[in-house]
Amino acid sequence: MSAIANHSQLTIHEAHQLLKTRQISAVELARTCLARIREVEPELQALVTVTDELALSQAQKAEALIAAGDAQSPLSGIPVLIKDNLCTRGVRTTCSSRMLGDFVPPYDATVVEKLTGCHAVIVGKTNMDEFAMGSSTENSAFFPTRNPWDRSRVPGGSSGGSAVGVAAGEAIYALGSDTGGSIRQPAGFCSVTGLKPTYGRVSRYGLVAFASSLDQIGPLTQDVADCALVLNAIAGYDPRDSTSVPYPAPDYTQCLTDDLNGLRLGVPKEYFVEGMQPEVATVIRTAISRLEELGAGIDWEVSLPHTPYALAAYYIIAPSEASANLARYDGVKYGFSYLETNNMWQAMEKTRQRGFGPEVKRRIMLGTYALSAGYYDAWYLKAQKVRTLIRQEFDQAFEKYDALVTPTSPTAPFRIGEKVDDPLQMYLSDVCTLPINIAGLPAVSIPTGFADGLPVGMQIIGKPFSEETILKIAYAFQQATDWHKRKPAI
Amino acid sequence: MKLSREEVLHIARLARLGLDEAEVDKFREQLSELLESFAVLQRVDTTGITPTAHSIALENVVRSDQVAASLPPDQILANAPQKEGDFFRVRPVLGDR
């Protein structure tokens, strides 16, 4: 690993100490990350936009505050990457789509406002699957992002750029979004920590909507302690998001202990799917045994019988909601616009034909079909009823267990190009993460080892608003192991 | 569960998505295969089950009707593909298809 990498591979809590005690400066830290970006981007392509001027200006302001003793937040002066579906005022926000290739938002997402309010230093906007639709970042309209652990392989998706940025030290942490696994699965594939909060815990205002009942924003970090720090900054009620819950958020750093005695964990066997990579199953079982050694009680025989239906339910519900959310892209008020016609409908049709990539079109069409007259009851309504059953099953499980533990993905990162022509194969890589979005639960993925040199993530799922419990379990695991400290050789 | 060409064109029309011939064929294949696979949902007994629209259900989320500042017109128009003065320029809506 290069000398440049060292500083950018500090955690938030380490960097905060060094900044507070003036051993490094915020500007130095920003320059380190920007240099690291220049060093690795030709190979990794995790970023759509590098925001060097903004970063240096924010770093200077943070430095002045830190020097005056006025920087209250542990995130002050710390470089961060923002997924490119989060609106950043004055900074291009593309969703990795030609439809928004030149779109510059006139406002910040709430989470971006919260971070800039903490004097965070934004170093770039990250590449993603177009409109968050995908599991490999290969659906970006611009370029695929490469996994730093093996550059012929995918980083996962749709927050692939964010996961890679953290793994490769292009920033100290990142924000991503998760609708069916889009934070957790790339976190697993890149060996970083990624959390999807309970639905409604973090405001979606300013997140370009994909599926409004499933989307959540969350942190990708180098460890659980950092994850808690970021969650502290972004969680909370926002009147501008009417699905944002009016429950106060606790200080998530307070729950981080390494004592799991008395905790009951369940392992739902349906998540060890047929066709799962055997080495991945072995790594996960070893990790769960470790949790048992740390004091947790494990029930290896939990069953959630409706799990196999979650994929179908998700791939009806999410595209249906997407077909409504993406109807706004009509070339009229913003975004790409086909101009060579004076016919309104043709303009819209051609705009959408040229502006959207194939996966986006596929999902819009699936969703339009499922919601259309004559099919709504059999498809969309049916899927929503199955959703109720899936949720009820989780609720019953959480009466007996404090958390559930599963693999994050059935396989290690696959090769670029391997699944991109087979939509169903691609969808199967999210089979462990999708049910969690359907039920609105919080879940975190943490590095748990390697299968043939490729990262494996373990997922810890909690009942609604139990981020403290799942973070505690993840923290204890990280105190007893060092998987999360390994870095790719780049 | 094979979709017909007409069904694909109908869906595309509802979604205002232009498709060329190759896309119609490709999506017809892919959507048929996907729907075939998702039809497994029909096997689940959902008698008496109410649908879930939102996993964390809130009710009647309202705010008081207070006038506040909006974005100024120049910012709203900044990304407009076509504009004229303080207006978005659009094509004629009436009198066609």
Image: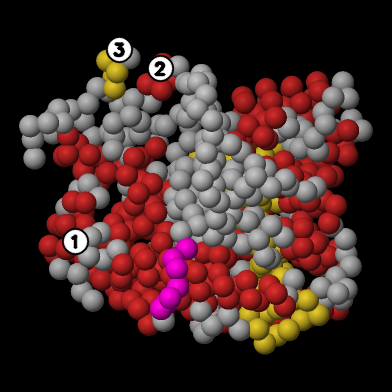
| Crowd band around label 2 with a 10 angstrom C-alpha radius: few (<14), some (14–19), many (20+) | few
Residue type at mark 3? Gly
Can you name the residue that lies furthest to the bottom here? Answer: A301
The numbered mark at residue B73 is 2
Q: Main secondary structure of the magenta part?
A: loop
**Which three-letter amino acid code belongs to the residue tagged 1?**
Val
Q: Pointer 1 indicates a residue of which chain? A: B
Query: Residue shown at 88%/64% (left/top)?
Result: A258
For label 1, the residue is B8
In the rendered structure, which amino acid carries the disc numbered 2?
Pro
**Percent position of residue A420, x then y:** 39, 64
Q: Is residue A461 above or below residue A166?
A: below
Residue bearing the label numbered 3: B85
Q: Earlier in the sequence, mark 3 or mark 1?
A: 1
State left or right for residue A413 relative to residue A120: left
Task: Report the front residue among A152 and A15.
Answer: A15
Q: Which residues are magenta?
A: B46-52
Secondary structure state at the residue bearing disc 2: helix
Q: Is residue A155 above or below residue A329?
A: below
Give the mark nearer the N terminus: 1 vs 2: 1
Q: Earlier in the sequence, mark 2 or mark 3?
A: 2
Q: Is the Cβ of the residue at disc 2 closer than 8 Å to that at disc 3? A: no
Identify which residue is drawn at 54% across, 30% down: B64
- Let me know if marks 3 and 1 both belong to one chain: yes
Q: Quadrant of residue A185?
A: bottom right
